Image (cartoon, rainbow, N blue to C red):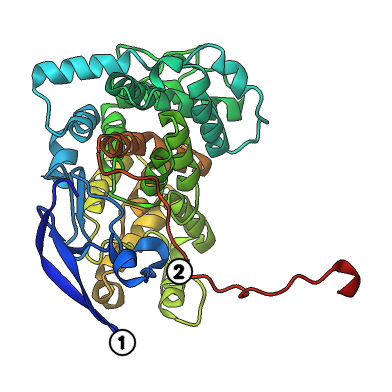
Amino acid sequence: MSGSKANGTVQVNEEGQGSTDLPMLEGSIGPKVIDIRKLYAQTGHFTYDPGFTSTASCDSAITYIDGDEGILMHRGYKIEELASQSDFMEVCFLLLKGELPDAEQKEKFTHDITYHTMLHEQLAQLFRGFRRDAHPMAIMVGVVGALSAFYHDSTDINDPHQRMIASYRLIAKMPTIAAMAYKYSIGQPFIYPNNELSYAENFLHMTFSVPAENYKMSPTVARAMDRIFILHADHEQNASTSTVRLAGSSGANPFACIAAGIACLWGPAHGGANEAVLTMLEEIGSVENVQKYIDKAKDKSDPFRLMGFGHRVYKNYDPRATVMQQTCHEVLDELGLKDEPMLKLAMELEKIALEDPYFVEKKLFPNVDFYSGIILKALGFPTSMFTVLFAVARTVGWVAQWNEMMEDPGQKIGRPRQLYTGHAERPFVPLVKR
């Protein structure tokens, strides 16, 4: 494994068959890893790990998470510092290149991304082939997958230059595709990118402006959008990132790999969590019902669950939520929406959850999905667009992980094993005898 080193062995005992020594590997930070690559050859046994929650599928130098301590770092930089002191283009450069850019590098990188934002004009016809009520994520999967049919000069995965062009194109064009999916769903004309605007500003402009009038850009809203992109840029080997890597391991082109990641992200257990927050708030209905639903959440026999609280990875406070909480209140103040019923309800729910001993003891703190759902609702995005925005932000993480995998000499096609529980061999019975 590149970037790791052997550090002792661990002994695996087999009943009646002696023992086998397996090497221990140590990364730059985090728990040690047992190298089981030769386990089957040495013992004739596989490991059993549904969901791969205890298995490292690769080694990576991009993102590190410590869920117990509430730590998320990209290339060694804490997410809180990146979100408060950096911008999305700088974070994109960091994830792709490994280091923060200097002023000249950042200017060139931003220019290169900006001048790749337009889509091939024929792709507009592809959008019009979808029903008006098609889910924006269905459109995203289809259009991103179709990019390989339009950009043949960046599909050779063995050419580092073409891989980087494809990476730039995906990062640049994803906001354009997302905005067009939204515009198509509401029957408004597509808005072309504006090279004078920043990445976040351009996305907001393409999404909410109309040809009939000038769009007034709020710096607070643009900064909030930029932070949402930063906080969702990468999150280690999650389901969608693992999907991108698995698709890429077969040699699929980068556009197909990212389309596969989008399809995985669409699942409500992954990218749909902030959408579920809004659905929950609609069910609660009003501030007067908050305590009733808090009690329901505490009742183990009640199926109701508070969405947007706690996290599968973070057993402490989600470090992204701290930044998002501040951003959420800035946006609500800017837009004068503190008294909007659903947002007022969300703030009351947040207040109780942060103070209630039950939630504090179980560390069920509001997570990034709770606050991002409120922000996106305040900005006027329909819930169907929430996961689309997640995909826009996560694209840079996907392409960074894909590039890292393609440059790894030890990369192999993904081929998980299974614990077979079906019939053992049995004789075939002819139809007339059944």
Q: Nearer the viewer, residue 327 or 336?
A: 327
Q: Secondary structure at mark 1?
A: loop
Label 2 crowding class (10 Å Cα cut-off): few <14, some 14-19, many 20+? Answer: some
Give residue 102's position: percent from left, percent from top.
8, 23
Task: Give the number of marks.
Answer: 2
Q: Which amino acid, mark 1? A: Glu
Sequence-first disc among 1 and 2? 1
Query: Which of these two is toward me, 300 or 288?
Result: 300
On the image, the x and y values in percent for residue 108 come to: 19, 15
- Is 28 rendered above or below residue 87? below
In the rendered image, residue 135, in percent from the top left (x then y), is placed at 59, 38
Of the residues shown, which amino acid type is indicated by label 2? Arg
Q: Is residue 32 visible?
A: no
Q: Which residue is mark 1?
A: 15
Q: Is residue 225 left or right of residue 72?
A: right
Residue 137 in view here:
yes
Residue 297 vs 407, above or below: the answer is below
Residue at image mark 2: 305
